[in-house]
Amino acid sequence: MAENNALDLGEDPTLLLVDDDEPFLRRLAKAMEKRGFSVETAGSVAAGRAIATARPPAYAVIDLRLEDGNGLDVVEVLRARRPDTRVVVLTGYGAIATAVAAVKIGATDYLSKPADANDITNALLATGDDLPPPPENPMSADRVKWEHIQRVYELCDRNVSETARRLNMHRRTLQRILAKRSPR
């Protein structure tokens, strides 16, 4: 507990949490409040955008896929209203393309779920000279390949034939890959 009080949150400890997973949102809010953040929560893109417009926070943790849209829309509003906000994008769908898009829009970091409060706090408070260490278990080559296929598939509006053509792959081979679970 002693280290939680030592966190340097600056003069403005406001934190916006945007996630449509209600139990996760409640647990994370409670954990971040214990670390000294002044937490405000939203369960949708619309609610997140409203809070970001009315009371842009110093910190934000935003889920990428929400029921009513894309969390990057909230990141854009935050960047417009308060460019110094430190934003961490969270997602259960850790795809390289979305990580790149999140960072280009202005996210400070990008974490795949399940991320705990310590990971999130470290990402929010990391500075350019003090970046968090590289992951203990980075993605395997099979996982990177699978992520790339998923990215192209999404960019082709989930059209298997178009995706197969762009990847220079047989359509049935692609269908078999898409039917399987993601590699670790």
Image (spheres, rainbow, N blue to C red):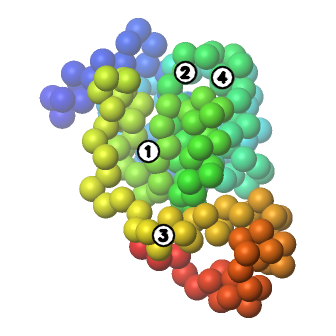
Q: Is residue 63 left or right of residue 125?
A: right
Q: CA distance from mark 4 to mark 3?
A: 31 Å
Front: mark 3 or 1: 3
Residue under label 3, please give it. 143
Residue under label 2, please give it. 85
Position of the N terminus by quadrant: top left
Residue nearest the viewer, comparing 118 with 24:
118
Q: Is residue 33 left or right of residue 52?
A: left
The answer to whether mark 2 and mark 4 are in CB contact below 8 A is yes
Q: Position of residue 168 (x, y in %)?
A: 73, 75
Residue nearest the viewer, comparing 86 with 66:
86
| Residue 184 vertical position relative to residue 74 in the rendered view, above or below | below
Front: mark 4 or 3: 3
Residue under label 1, please give it. 28
Q: Position of residue 90 (x, y in %)?
A: 53, 47
Q: Secondary structure at mark 3?
A: helix
Q: Quadrant of residue 18?
A: top right
Q: Position of residue 86 (x, y in %)?
A: 50, 25
Q: Secondary structure at mark 4?
A: helix
What type is the residue that disc 2 sits on?
Thr
Residue 175 visible? The answer is no
What type is the residue that disc 1 sits on?
Leu
Which residue is depicted at the point 71% across and 80% down?
169
